[in-house]
Amino acid sequence: MRMWLGWLLAGWMSFGVAAGAQDYGDTPYVPTPQVVVDRMLETAKVTKRDFVIDLGSGDGRMIITAAQRFGARGFGVDLNRNLVQTANRNAAKAGVANRAVFYEQDLHETDLSKADVLSLYLLPEVNLMIRSRILALRPGTRLVSHDYGFGEWPPDIEFIMDAPGKKVGRDEKSKVLFYVVPAQVAGKWVWSAPGGTYDLELDQVFQKISGTLGVNGRRANIDKAQLSGEQIRFEAVVGETRYEFIGKVTNNAINGEMRVAGAAHAWDATRTMLREARFHDLKPGVMAR
Ligand SMILES: C[S@@+](CC[C@H](N)C(=O)[O-])C[C@H]1O[C@@H](n2cnc3c(N)ncnc32)[C@H](O)[C@@H]1O
């Protein structure tokens, strides 16, 4: 895999230099093959309710496809003025200029707060530069990236696909990586419910969570733990009893449902101690995959 990525990067660099594209910012212009654009937007489950932002938008194909095929709205930014003009022309030709707009702007200075979905095809070190801004976005914001990841942040979905006509690399393959910005849940949570008083101690590394559940003073590790955006679920067996939880995190509250030995109750937890989630690499400087 490393060798394949090495080839891809080397190919990309020479393509960028040949095209003189590196004049325009951190990442040279290489278009994403249309079939990969389609799969990226499908993977992100883009709908007409979504606002999509493409960072380094090239000829506009990502946002134009999001508008044309999925009914979404959005904008793209690029430093290359010619590409921005081409993208706006392409949007007009496709009949979606009212929903797909392109600006000449540095992605490092672009306000991302409107995004439901972010798409990008940037070099791995650029991904790392913007990762902390992405992780600070609204939990549940979806992110889909072509070829490169975000260091130690593990993707929720990752696959390699055929990319006929791809301008870099030698095997016409593309990697698609999908992420959901996780809520910050690390800390101590407490609540009461039929059966007693409960507390939950959670640690968090990106979207991976672990910890212990306490029930009336007895403790056990949680298992089957999942965090996707603001949705949290986990189970634990304390004593002989299995507890299952599913809820939605909103700042320092979780609201949802708990099942104790099959019986359902409301689950309303409050965070009494905030712990820092680890949203950074342990080995900084390592190339993102
Ligand atoms: C690999 S291309 C991807 C184009 C398009 N997103 C696609 O997938 O077809 C990267 C694009 O990012 C643009 N770019 C590089 N650095 C940028 C920056 N700092 N701000 C905005 N755009 C940038 C380049 O001009 C180029 O068009």
Image: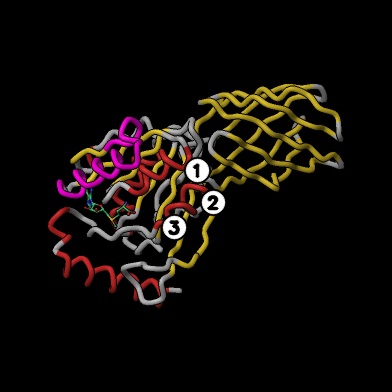
| Magenta stretch: dominant secondary structure | helix
Q: Is residue 47 left or right of residue 86?
A: right
Query: Disc 1 on helix, strand or loop?
Result: strand
Say if the magenta span includes residue 132. no
Which residue range is magenta in the image?
Answer: 81-101
- Identify which amino acid the numbered label 2 is placed on: Asp
Q: Is residue 189 left or right of residue 35?
A: right
Instruction: Tell me if residue 206 can be seen.
Output: no
Residue beneath the point at 44% across and 49% down: 144
Residue beneath the point at 36% across and 47% down: 131
Q: Is residue 229 left or right of residue 57?
A: right
**Label pair 2/1, CB-CB below 8 angstroms:** yes
Instruction: Tell me if residue 12 can be seen.
Output: yes
Q: In the image, residue 68 lies at what x, y percent? A: 42, 40
Q: Which mark is residue 36?
A: 3
Q: Is residue 277 left or right of residue 258?
A: left
Q: Which mark is residue 156?
A: 2
The local crowd at label 1, few if under 14, some if 14 to 19, many if 20 or more residues have their Cα within 10 Å, is many
Q: Nearer the viewer, residue 190 or 45?
A: 45
Say if the magenta span includes residue 92. yes
The residue identified by callout 1 is 180
Q: Which mark is residue 152?
A: none
